[in-house]
């Protein structure tokens, strides 16, 4: 069964703690925390102090931190200290990939690598043996609520085949445009085992109901 990581980018920030509690109570497996720097992507979201407060309020939750920032190596230690469980950054970022992955692991966090829609799946192959999570973007990163790019499915298949060929079991995650009633089942069929969903969960009239629907897939 695929796991669900609701993205709080689409939550109501005036009641962030309640929103997080609601989706966790409904069965969400972890919380996806989207960090944007206004440079790597054309949007600015939230960062270290917000994660720190969430960690304080939810000491046992797995925080799946997705850094859409230009130079993740500069910030991984602060995100680890603030309570990240897994830190995922982009192969397209400017930090040296091997050093950044090593730094994340030295901080006792799980390490993930993300790829944009225009980046081939093979870009993560040299690092695959050391990853806890591989994230294939279903949209151009920067904003919630965009339509899923169908070419993502083929990339998920390529990643699934390569992981299976090497007997590796990282989370194979898909982020952007994931909807329980349409794209999520296709992503699972293509090999994803971790679904990130923002607007599908938090813009729904009943977030708990949608979490349960995702979890039934
Ligand atoms: C997009 C973010 C996503 C975003 C997904 O740049 O990385 O995590 O919250 O939002 P939806 O599910 O609405 O496409
Ligand atoms: Zn994300």
Image (tube, grey):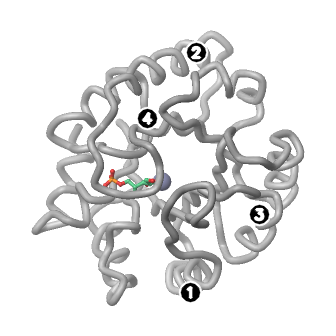
Residue 193 numbered mark, or none: 4
Vertically, is 215 above or below 211? above
Instruction: Give SS at disc 4.
Output: loop
Left or right: residue 187 compared with residue 105: left
* Mark 3 residue crowding within 10 angstroms, few (<14) / some (14–19) / many (20+): many
Query: How would you rate the neighbour count of disc 1 (Cα within 10 Å): few for under 14, some for 14-19, many for 20 or more?
Result: some
Residue drawn at x 60%, y 29% as measured from the top left: 169
Mark 4 vs mark 3: which is more N-terminal?
3
Q: Nearer the viewer, residue 39 or 25?
A: 39
- Residue 182, given in percent of the width and then of the height, sits at 17, 35
Q: Earlier in the sequence, mark 1 or mark 2?
A: 1
**Do labels 1 and 2 touch, CB within 8 Å?**
no
Q: Where in the figure is residue 43, as x and y percent of width and height? A: 49, 65
Of labels 4 and 2, earlier in sequence is 2
Name the residue that disc number 2 marks: 164
Left or right for 9, reference 77: left
Residue 206 in the figure: left or right of residue 165: left
Query: CA–CA distance between discs 2 and 3?
Result: 29 Å
Q: Quadrant of residue 189?
A: top left
Q: Residue at (86%, 39%) from the top-left corner? A: 98
Mark 4 Cβ inside 8 Å of ligand 2: no
Cα–Cα gap, marks 3 and 1: 17 Å
Q: Which mark is residue 76?
A: 3
**SS for callout 2:** helix
Residue pointed to by mark 1: 53
Q: Earlier in the sequence, mark 2 or mark 3?
A: 3
């Amino acid at each position: 069964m695929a796991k669900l990581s609701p993205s709080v980018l689409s939550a109501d920030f005036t009641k962030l703690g309640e929103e997080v509690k609601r989706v966790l109570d409904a069965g969400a497996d972890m919380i996806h925390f989207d960090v944007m720097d206004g440079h790597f992507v054309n949007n600015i979201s939230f960062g270290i102090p917000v994660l720190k407060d969430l960690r304080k309020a939810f000491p046992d939750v797995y925080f799946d931190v997705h850094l859409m920032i230009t130079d993740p190596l500069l910030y991984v230690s602060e995100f680890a200290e603030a309570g990240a469980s897994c830190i995922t950054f982009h192969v397209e970022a400017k930090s040296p990939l091997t050093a950044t992955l090593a730094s994340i692991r030295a901080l006792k966090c799980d390490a993930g690598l993300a790829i944009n829609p225009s980046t081939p799946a093979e870009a993560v192959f040299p690092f695959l043996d050391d990853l806890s999570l591989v994230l294939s973007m279903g949209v151009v990163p920067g904003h919630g609520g965009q339509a899923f790019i169908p070419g993502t499915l083929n990339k998920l298949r390529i990643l699934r085949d390569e992981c299976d060929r090497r007997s590796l079991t990282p989370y194979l995650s898909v982020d952007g445009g994931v909807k329980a009633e349409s794209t999520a089942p296709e992503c699972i069929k293509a090999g994803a085992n971790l679904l990130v969903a923002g607007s599908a969960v938090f813009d729904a009239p009943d977030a708990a109901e949608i979490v349960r629907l995702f979890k039934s897939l």
